[in-house]
Amino acid sequence: MKEELLGSLRGILSEENILIDEPMSRHTTFKTGGPARLFIRPDNRQQLLEALDIIRKSGEQHYILGNGSNLLVSDKGYEGVIISLSNLRNLEVVDETHIRAEAGCLNSQIAALARENSLTGFEFAAGIPGTIGGAMIMNAGAYGGEMKDITAEVSAIDPEGREITLKASECDFGYRTSRLKREGYVVTDALLMLSLSDPDTIQAAMTDLALRRKEKQPLEYPSAGSTFKRPEGYFAGKLIEDAGLKGFSVGGAQVSEKHCGFVINRSAATSADIYSLICEVQKRVLAASGVTLEPEVIMLGEF
Ligand SMILES: Cc1cc2nc3c(=O)[nH]c(=O)nc-3n(C[C@H](O)[C@H](O)[C@H](O)COP(=O)(O)OP(=O)(O)OC[C@H]3O[C@@H](n4cnc5c(N)ncnc54)[C@H](O)[C@@H]3O)c2cc1C
C-alpha cells in the first residue's frame, strides 16, 4: 500500500475510520474472510467523494462494502481498499409517501421508520439483512417484492467520480442485478416510494414474514442467504436436495439441513471451505439434473 495514499486519506478521514489489515470476517455475515489491506469508513457523502477521488488517482483497487451479507471474501483477504458505507446512515421521511435513505441504512431500520409513519410497501425487505445500497445494487427481493417496485430514484457516483441521479426506470433492475451493479456505480442514497396504510397491518405483515423466515431458513448459523440464483423453472434448494446434498459438508461449511438453498458456516468454516462446497454442489447438481447453478453470493479476492 502506498504511503502517499494513506497520507492523503488521513487528510480527510478521522483516524478511527482508517483500519489497516482489518479482518473481513468481522464484516461479512459468513464470518469468514482474510484482511483488507486498507479498510476505510467515510462519515458522509463528501468524504466518500473525496476518498474515491484520491483512491482513483492512486491507481489502487477498491471495493464498496454494504453489510457484507452477500459476500464471500477470500481467506487471503483483499489487496486494495475496502470502502465501508456503514456510517452513511441519514434516514428521513420526505413527504407523505416518500422516504430517503442513505446507502448505509439497514433495511430493518427503514422498515421500522416506514411502519412508524404508516407507510406500506417495504415489509418484504425488513428481514433482508443488508443495507439499502446493497439492496439497490442487487435488486434485493423476497416474498413477491423487489426493490424495483418501490424505488423512485437512486443517487450514485459513477466510475468517473460524477454524482448522478437515476430514475428507477433508468436503473434497469433485473433478477438480483441492476445497471448500478453492471456499470460499477457507488450508490449514495435511494428515494423510496411507499403508500399509506395502517401501522398494525404493516406490523402484522412484518411479523408474519419474520416467522416464515425463522421457520424455513437456518438463521441460527452464519450464511449469506440463498447461495445460488433461482434457475428458471426450478428451485435451487430442491435441485440440491434431489442431488442428495442435504447436509453435505466441506470442512466447516455445510449445505443447510433446514434449507438446501443455504450454504452455512456450520463450525469455523474458512472461505475456502465455502468456495469448495459451492463448486462441488454446482458439479453434482449439473450431473444429477443438467441444470447449472449460478452463485448469487459475490466472491471477492483470490479463490
Ligand atoms: C440470512 C440472510 C437472508 C437473506 N435473504 C435475502 C432475501 O430474502 N432476498 C435477497 O435479495 N437477499 C437476501 N440475502 C442476501 C443479502 O442480504 C442481499 O443481497 C443484500 O441486498 C446485500 O446487501 P449488503 O448491504 O449486505 O451488500 P454487501 O453484501 O455488502 O454487497 C453486495 C454487493 O453490493 C455492492 N454494494 C453494496 N453497497 C453498495 C453501494 N452503496 N454502492 C455500490 N455497491 C454496493 C458490493 O460491492 C457487493 O458487490 C440474505 C442474506 C442473509 C445472510
Image (tube, rainbow, N blue to C red):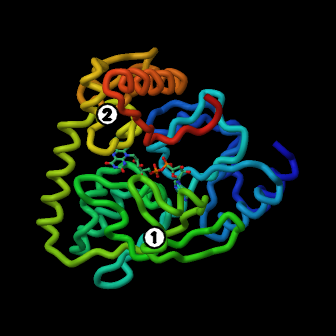
Among all residues in the image, which is located at the extreme bottom?
95
Q: Nearer the viewer, mark 1 or mark 2?
A: 2
Q: Is mark 1 within 8 Å of ligand 1?
A: no
Q: Nearer the viewer, residue 245 or 17?
A: 245
Dot 1 lies on which element?
Answer: strand
Who's the residue at 75% across and 64% down the image?
A: 53
* N-terminal label among 1 and 2: 1
Q: Position of residue 118 (x, y in %)?
A: 21, 74
Q: Position of residue 54 (x, y in %)?
A: 78, 60
Among all residues in the image, which is located at the extreme right?
4
Q: Position of residue 51 (x, y in %)?
A: 72, 61
- Which residue is denoted by mark 2 in the rendering? 261
Q: Position of residue 74 (x, y in %)?
A: 59, 31
Who's the residue at 77% across and 58% down the image?
A: 56
Give the quadrant of the C terminus: top right
- Which residue is denoted by mark 1 in the rendering? 190
Who's the residue at 59% across and 63% down the image?
A: 185
